[in-house]
Structures are given as C-alpha cells and as structure tokens.
Amino acid sequence: MSDEFLFAEEPVAEPSLHHGSWKVLIVDDEPEVHTVTRLALSDFQFQGKTLQFISAYSGKEAKALLAEHPDTAVMLLDVVMETDDAGLQVASYVREVFKNEHVRIILRTGQPGQAPERQVIVNYDINDYKSKTELTAQKLFTVIMSSLRSYRDILALEQSRQGLEKIILASTNLFSSHSMEQFIDGVLQQLTSVLGCNEDALLVSSSLVAGNINSVADPHDLIVFAGQGEFECKEGKPVSEVLDKTLMEAFDSALQSRSIVYRENYLVAYCTSKFTHGSLLYISGLPGHITDNQKKLIELFAQNVQVAYENVQLQHEIEDTQREIVYRLSEAVEHRSIETGNHVRRVAFICYDLAKAYGLPAEEAECLMFASPLHDVGKVGIPDSILNKPDKLKDAEWEVMKTHTSIGYEILKNSKRAIIQAGAIIAMDHHEKWDGSGYPAGKKGEDIHIYGRIAAIADVYDALRHRRCYKTAWSLSEVMAKIEAESGKQFEPKLVEIFKQRVEKLEAILQKYPDDEY
C-alpha cells in the first residue's frame, strides 16, 4: 500500500450538520484495505451526510450483507478473494439475482491481469474499474463523490417513477377517498424527488381541512391527511400528536403568515385555494440550497393540491346528497303507510351486511345498500284505501297491491345512475320467490337478481319484527322459524343460512334504528 494513498492532501471541508449517512460496502479479503479506506474517507460528507461503512471479507459475506442492507449506495468490490473471480460473481449476483440496479459498483483489484479492464467492463454491469495502486486518497474521494451523485440521481428518478405510478393508478378512480390519498401521496413523492430529498431523509405530511379563511388559526386544529417517511400511517391524527414543539412553531408561523416558511433542512408551506384555507405542507431532508425553480414548484404545489382535494370533496358531497334524497323520498313513501319509522334505513343496513357475508364485492354491497330504500317506491301508485287497510285484502285489492313492483320499476328504469338502476331491479324483484311462486313475473332461483333476493329477506325480516297497521310485531323466534320454513321456497337457501349466522348483528341494527311510537 503506497504512502500516497494514505497521505494524499485533501481540501479542508467546512463543518456542517449531519442529516443521515450513505452506506458504503467494502468487500475485500485484506483487513488493511478496510482500515485504509475508512481512514481516507473518515471526514467525507455529501449533502450533509457522512459515510456509514459496512465490511465484508468474502464474496459470500458480501451477498448476505447486501441483502441485509439493500439501500447500500456504493460497493467497493475486490475481484480476487476466496476464488479468482469471487468479485465478478458478486457483481453478477447483485444485478441479475438480487435485481439491485441502484448500488454503484466500483471494482478494485490488485491484480489487473487477472481481470482485464476492457473485458470486465463489457461483460459485467459495474460502474467503475480501478487498480488499487492508482486509488490515491484524492482519487478515492473523487470516485466516491461521483458515485454518490449517480446514486442520488438514480434514486430521484426511481422515486419520481413511483410517484407517477401512484398518480396514474389513483387517477383511474380519483373520486374514491382511498384513491385521493394515493393521488396526493404520489404527487408528494414526485415533488420530493424533484427537490432532491432522498427517501431516507424524507419526512412529508400534508394536513388538509375545510373551512373559511378564519376557521383555522391554530395548527392544533389540523389533522394529517397524507404522510411519508416518519409520518407514514399517521393519517387522521392531530398534528399536535405527530410534531414536536419546534415543528409546531414553524407550522404556526406558516399558518399565521400564510406563506412558505423555510428552515435549515425543511420547509412548511401554507396551502390555499379560492374556497378553503389553512392547510400546510411539510417537507424535510431538503438539500442545502433550494433554487428559484424549486421554490416556484413548491408554490405551485401549495396552490393546487388544495384545489384537487376540494374537487374530490365536492364529488363526495354530490354523492351524499343523492343518497340523502333517496332516503328522504323512500321514507316519504313509507309515511303513506302510517308506518312512521326507520324501515328503509334498517333494510339498507341489513342488505349491506347480508351482501358482504354473501360474498358480493364492497362496491356492489354499497350500491345495494343505497338502492334498497327504493324497494317500495311503487306504493306511491297504490290507493290509500288499499295501502292502509287493516283487514285482509280482497283478491282484486291484492292484485292492485302487487302492481307496486312494476310501478316502482317503471318510475326508476330509465335512470343512468347506478344506484337508481339498482333500485329499479330491487323494486321489480323483491317479491319474487326462489321456487317461482312470487310476483310480478314468477321468476325462479338465480333468475331473480341477487339484489332482489337479498332485499326480499331483509324486507320480510324487518317487517315481521315490527308492528304494522295490519299486524303486531313478531318475536325473534317466530321470525326465525318463518324464515327457516321458507328456505328453498320464498328465499334462497344460502341466504337463509347466512341470515341465521348473522342474526345477532341484524338484531343490533334493529335496536340502533327503532320505529317511532304511533
């Protein structure tokens, strides 16, 4: 080992704060190489980070350590160790087996003739090739610096790719709550990659709340909406539970000044839009210098992330309004029957529970829940003298009563809205019977839509358990006996078994939404 390697002059580095470290894996069977490398790079820093050295003394050990430390930035790899090509085998393993395209591999050899440079560079995916005799302290500094820059840029590209992937996946169904969180998380990942914040040092939290300009004057009122790094899985928590005192002060400063507050290695940006104010964006692990272009990008994000959030909230508000209208109209129909209660609300929740237990996807179960209150909407076309008759209906009256299924279908069938379309199906099919003896069409078995089959058992169960103008409420045991007796006749046998298994939960729904006294 030459004295030049040990004692080549280095420029004196200015002291700076440490914000983590870069992992360097030294792979060499000579202990002296490890010692000298650590000594030569002892004061190395890049972007405020020092080096963390990991030592392997054989190719086998190198593979194990790389699996343990997949975030290794640079590997200084000897060629000849336990075998003449041990280092080359490690290089192949890293790229082809371990699929690690990020780590920068610098091949070092004391026997250049054993592994000719041209042949190695062509045949192996390495990033540099150095003879140990030519690696002075200054050249080692240079190769590590250039390798770390490459590693940093590769991570930024990968992070940007992952962020873009999240945005694309979320954009296919942006108006669901989960997709909105994923969308913002992806945009944040894109933003931080452009700013040069690597994944280890990245701490991001975006807290969004709705309200007028004076509604949020205290950061304690904010909640975390999306987070990365240290703040991952903190969604929904108050920021006061997530941030320390220093960060809370920075949040308060940004909130009061309604601006972007820059600190030594992090920023807090005030986010606003035309309608909503008081949201904050926090990013840490920033590089030492933020350019004007990067500041403009941060300002653009702060202005537009709130708008995106509000658009989704508006969509949710429209959907909630539609569902509320369905409930109110359905309850209005029920009121004509002198049954001032929560029948339609209970049926909705019973349908959802049974649908999930039956195995319907969550989206279909929700559609059934929101549509089921429309099952008796056709009763608007039935005369009060028949609808509210306390005595048994005459044959002619019963035929009129049965028309409420087709009336409901005709009212709803031409809608282009999924919930209303489902309501039309339920209105038509909820009095069909599994054995084909129901009405209006005498459908049988699986010819009856699953929505109708589920709504049928939910409607009968709730109706029997409550008082009506023509009957008293039945006990649970009486209802259970009736529904079991109708298995394979009125109801699908599978649904009857599910009903029996879920009856305790269904009874809890009845208790939660009781009828008013009348």
Image (cartoon, helix red, strand yellow):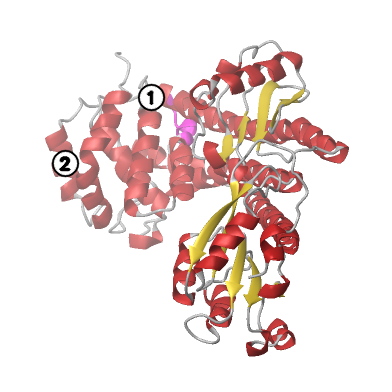
Residue nearest the viewer, comparing 392 with 277? 277
Q: What kind of residue is marked 1? A: Ser
> For the N terminus, which image quadrant?
bottom right
Residue nearest the viewer, comparing 158 with 123? 123
Q: Which residues are magenta?
A: 377-384
Give me the residue at 65% from left, 21% from top. 251
Residue nearest the viewer, comparing 169 with 57? 57
Q: Point out residue 318 in the picture as x, y percentages from the top left corner.
A: 63, 32
Q: Which residue is mark 1?
A: 337
Q: What kind of residue is marked 2? A: Met
Residue 115: mark in rendering = none
**Against 11, is 477 above or below?**
above
Element marked by disc 2: helix
In the displayed image of the protein, which residue is found farthest to the front?
A: 3
Give me the residue at 67% from left, 50% from top. 44
Residue 480: mark in rendering = 2
